[in-house]
C-alpha cells in the first residue's frame, strides 16, 4: 500500500516537473488553455512558429482607415491607427502600442527584440528603437497576418443616399467632397434582397444604383450634399444617365427623414424656378444593399475619371 503511494507521489512530481519545463520552452505554451481563433496554416506559420510574411505583401501595409488592430489569435486590442506610420520597410509600422498590449522578448541571438501579444503570446514581429522615424523613436514592425482590423465607429455623422446613374461616377464626386467621411456604392429601392450587380443589370429587381454618403454635419450639410448631387449629373434625363439606359440608372434622392425630404424638395423647387425640368425621383430610404467590392471607390482604385458624370456649377 505504502509502496503504491510512493510510486504515485514520484509520478506526480515527475509530471509536474515536465510541465514546468515545457512551459519555459515557448511563451505561447503558457497560454495553451485559452480559447483561440482558428488559424489558417499560413497564419499559424507566422503567429505560432514566429515566421515573417514577405515584405510589401501584407494586407495592412498601406491601410489608413481609422480604427483598432486586434490580435488575429485572441482578439486583444494591440494598436491604434493613429500610431501607424509609413516606414517604407515593407511591413505595417506603429510607433506605439495600446498600453500593456504588447510584450517585448529578446531574440535568442540577442540582436533583435521580438514583440508578442501580451494576452496570448502570438508572434507579431520585432520592435526597433532609435531609428528616427517618429518622435517616439520606436518602430513596431508587425506582420499584417498577425492582425485583424476593426474600423472605428463613426459617431455624430449623418447618412445620405443618392442615385444618379452609374454609381462609380456618383461616388467619385461624393468621396472627394469636404466633410464626407465615407462612401459606399450599392442598391436601393427594389424588391430583391441582397441583389448582385448582375441581377440589378437584368432591370427587374427594381433597385437603383445608389451611393451611401456618410458625412460630418459639423463640417458640411445635407444641403451641400444635395447641391453636389444635382451639380454632378443630368437630372433632366428620364430614361437613365448618359449612355447608361435603364431603370437602375435613374436619378433619385432617397431621403432618410422628413428634414432631408424638405431640403430635397427645396432644391427641386429652386431648379424648377431656374427653368429646369427635373426628372429626379424622391423616395424614402430603404435597405441599402452594398455592391460587390470591386465596385467600391472604383475610380480611385483605377486611377481614372467618370465617363458619364461631370461637375457643372448651378447653385
Ligand atoms: Zn493575442
Image (cartoon, helix red, strand yellow):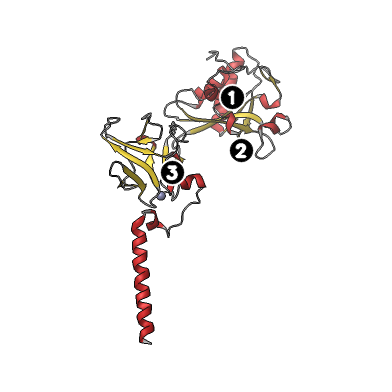
Query: For residue 146, which numbered disc appears in the image?
Result: 3
Give the percent coordinates (x, y) of residue 134: 29, 31
Q: Dividing the image into 4 quarters, which one contains the N terminus?
A: bottom left
Total marks shown come to 3
Q: Quadrant of residue 17?
A: bottom left
Give the percent coordinates (x, y) of residue 178: 45, 23
Query: For residue 287, which numbered disc appears in the image?
Result: 2
Residue that badge 1 annotates: 168
Q: Is the residue 3 above or below the residue 46 in the image?
A: below
* Structural crowding at the residue carrying mark 2, measured as other residues with C-alpha within 10 Å and reported as few (<14), some (14–19) or many (≥20): few
- Residue 69 or residue 51, whichever sits in front: 51
- Give the residue drawn at x 59%, y 16%: 271
**Label 1 C-beta lies within 8 Å of the nearest ligand 1 atom:** no
- Give the residue drawn at x 61%, y 29%: 210
Between the residue at mark 2 and the residue at mark 1, the CA separation in whole angstroms equals 19 Å
* Structural crowding at the residue carrying mark 3, measured as other residues with C-alpha within 10 Å and reported as few (<14), some (14–19) or many (≥20): many
State which mark lies toward you, 2 or 1. 1
Q: Quadrant of residue 94?
A: top left
Q: Is the residue 196 above or below the residue 220 in the image?
A: below
Give the percent coordinates (x, y) of residue 144: 44, 39
Between the residue at mark 3 and the residue at mark 1, the CA separation in whole angstroms equals 33 Å
Between the residue at mark 3 and the residue at mark 2, the CA separation in whole angstroms equals 35 Å
Q: Contact (CB < 8 A) between labels 3 and 1? A: no
Give the percent coordinates (x, y) of residue 295: 59, 29
- Going from N to C along the chain, the mark reached first, 2 or 1, is 1
- Going from N to C along the chain, the mark reached first, 3 or 2, is 3
Left or right of 208: which side holds 139?
left
- Residue 148 can be seen in this image: no
Amino acid at each position: 500500500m505504502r509502496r503504491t503511494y510512493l510510486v504515485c507521489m514520484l509520478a506526480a512530481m515527475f509530471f509536474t516537473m515536465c510541465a514546468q519545463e515545457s512551459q519555459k520552452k515557448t511563451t505561447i505554451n503558457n497560454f495553451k488553455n485559452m480559447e483561440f481563433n482558428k488559424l489558417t496554416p499560413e497564419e499559424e506559420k507566422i503567429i505560432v512558429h514566429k515566421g515573417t510574411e514577405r515584405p510589401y505583401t501584407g494586407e495592412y501595409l498601406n491601410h489608413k482607415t481609422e480604427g483598432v488592430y486586434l490580435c488575429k489569435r485572441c482578439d486583444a486590442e494591440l494598436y491604434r491607427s493613429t500610431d501607424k506610420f509609413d516606414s517604407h520597410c515593407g511591413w505595417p509600422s506603429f510607433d506605439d502600442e495600446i498600453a500593456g498590449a504588447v510584450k517585448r522578448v529578446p531574440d535568442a541571438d540577442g540582436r533583435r527584440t521580438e514583440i508578442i501579444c501580451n494576452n496570448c503570446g502570438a508572434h507579431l514581429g520585432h520592435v526597433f528603437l532609435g531609428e528616427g522615424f517618429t518622435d517616439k523613436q520606436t518602430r513596431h514592425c508587425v506582420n499584417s497576418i498577425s492582425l485583424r482590423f476593426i474600423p472605428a465607429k463613426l459617431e455624430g455623422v449623418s447618412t445620405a443616399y443618392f442615385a444618379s446613374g452609374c454609381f462609380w461616377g456618383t461616388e467619385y464626386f461624393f468621396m472627394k467632397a469636404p466633410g464626407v467621411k465615407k462612401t459606399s456604392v450599392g442598391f436601393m429601392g427594389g424588391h430583391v434582397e441582397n441583389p448582385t450587380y448582375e441581377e440589378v443589370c437584368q432591370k427587374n429587381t427594381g433597385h437603383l444604383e445608389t451611393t451611401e454618403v456618410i458625412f460630418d454635419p459639423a463640417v458640411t450639410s445635407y444641403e451641400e450634399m444635395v447641391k453636389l448631387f444635382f451639380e454632378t449629373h443630368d437630372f433632366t434625363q428620364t430614361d437613365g444617365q448618359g449612355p447608361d439606359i435603364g431603370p437602375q440608372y435613374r436619378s433619385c434622392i432617397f431621403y432618410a427623414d422628413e428634414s432631408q425630404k424638405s431640403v430635397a424638395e427645396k432644391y427641386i423647387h429652386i431648379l424648377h424656378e431656374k427653368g429646369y425640368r427635373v426628372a429626379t425621383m424622391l423616395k424614402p430610404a430603404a435597405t441599402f444593399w452594398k455592391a460587390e467590392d470591386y465596385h467600391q471607390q472604383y475610380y480611385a482604385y483605377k486611377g481614372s475619371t467618370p465617363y458619364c458624370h461631370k461637375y457643372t456649377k448651378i447653385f
